[in-house]
Amino acid sequence: MTSRERFLAACVGEKLDRPPLWVMRQAGRYLPEYRALKAKSSFLEMVRTPALAAEVTLQPLRRFALDAAILFSDILVIPEALGQGYHFRDVGGIGMKYRLETRAQIDALAPASAVPERLRYVADTLAALKKELAGRQALLGFGGSPWTLATYMVEGGSSDEFERIKLLFYTDRSAFDALLEKLTAALIAYFKMQIAAGADAIQIFDSWGGIIAGPDYEAASLRWIRQIVAALPPTFPVILYAKGTAPHLLDQAFTGIRVLSVDWTNDLAMVRRTLPANVAVQGNLDPVLLNTTPEIVTREATRLLASMRGTTGHIFNLGHGIMPTAKIECMQALVDTVTGWK
Ligand code: CP3
């Protein structure tokens, strides 16, 4: 069985001898070969140049026996394609070119139909990767959720309190809905393009879903995700990752997604028992563990694997992205533990 077959089998809940493994942010700053490439090209250059983006995507697969490759890109290419560029602040975090403050600015964003052409480099990167992987590993595309993207656009970048986006949601619902509708349409066009270019699955990152008041999660985030899933081919595997949304796991599971990626605060075996069998789970080691020692990683990964023994529909991953300070030997211990599991 190839890694790709293993990954796709886990998505549909087939019985497997061990779960497939990939790691959120598996390409990135903890890898010396990534840092070497970044010394020569900026992040944005790497994202926009298919040969470079494909190379960075493949770096972790050359080193580790991972079952899936994830497109090297960023969720913020969507706001950029709509006319609101982004950069990295010197102090860390994201800065947007401007802050989205008025209804007129929302209406002035480019239409969703502009997205496939402006992000053609993503399709080119995926096509190059598809060829290179030759069906050995699964190829994952991704994008942000409409809500998570809207937070960056309305806050003007990374935020601590998310006051502006919440004010928009509570004081001008029609402008909020207009923005989220536009993002939803843009993401549908973007994901269709990724699927046509060869993506085997798509992960939607609702990274800021957890900052919404519980009773408002549906109106602020989940309904838009549901619209996206409904617009994609019916059996196509969509993975939903949302951080800090434990109270909403069941609602998330009923959006039509195939896989729910859960953060480290949940007990994954308990989540597995709670969710319907036709939804797979992905996760969920605490990323901080990869900053400890190989012995601790082996112990904790084994504990998670043992807790999931006998279940179906599990893709092994972290509960959020690997940190830039993660140790290579810890990542190696994780890969050895999961791929050697019996
Ligand atoms: O998983 C992968 O390997 C794919 C690559 C990937 C990146 N960003 C590359 C990246 C993915 C899936 C993302 C998604 C992303 N981008 C999210 C959602 C995922 C999550 O973690 O919840 C978000 C919120 C962003 C926005 C973003 N981009 C942030 C907050 C940052 C960090 C800014 C900082 O403070 O440094 C980025 C930059 C970024 N995206 C890097 C990488 C490898 C680091 C860039 C660098 O090399 O300096």
Image: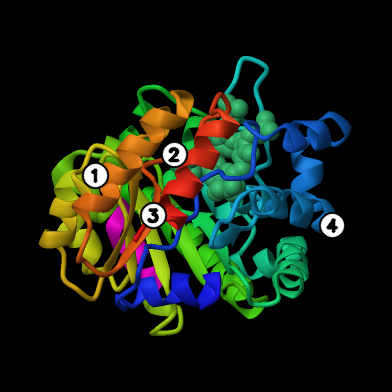
Q: CA distance from mark 4 to mark 3?
A: 28 Å
Disc 2 secondary structure class? helix
The Cα–Cα distance between marks 2 and 3, rounded to whole angstroms, is 29 Å
Q: Residues within 10 Å of mark 1 (few under 14, many from 20)?
A: many
Label pair 2/4, CB-CB below 8 angstroms: no
Q: Which residues are magenta?
A: 221-229
Give the spatial CA distance, label 1 vs label 4.
Answer: 36 Å
Is residue 153 visible in the rendered image? The answer is no
Task: In the rendered structure, find residue 245 and report the number of the disc placed on it.
Answer: 1
Q: Relative to residue 234, is residue 101 depicted above or below?
A: above
- Tell me if label 1 and label 4 are in contact, CB under 8 Å: no
Residue projecting furthest to the right: 40
Q: Crowding at label 3, few (<14), some or many (≥20) Cα neighbours within 10 Å?
A: many
Which numbered mark, 1 or 4, is in the foreground of this view?
4
Residue holding disc 2: 151
| Residue on which the image places disc 3 | 316
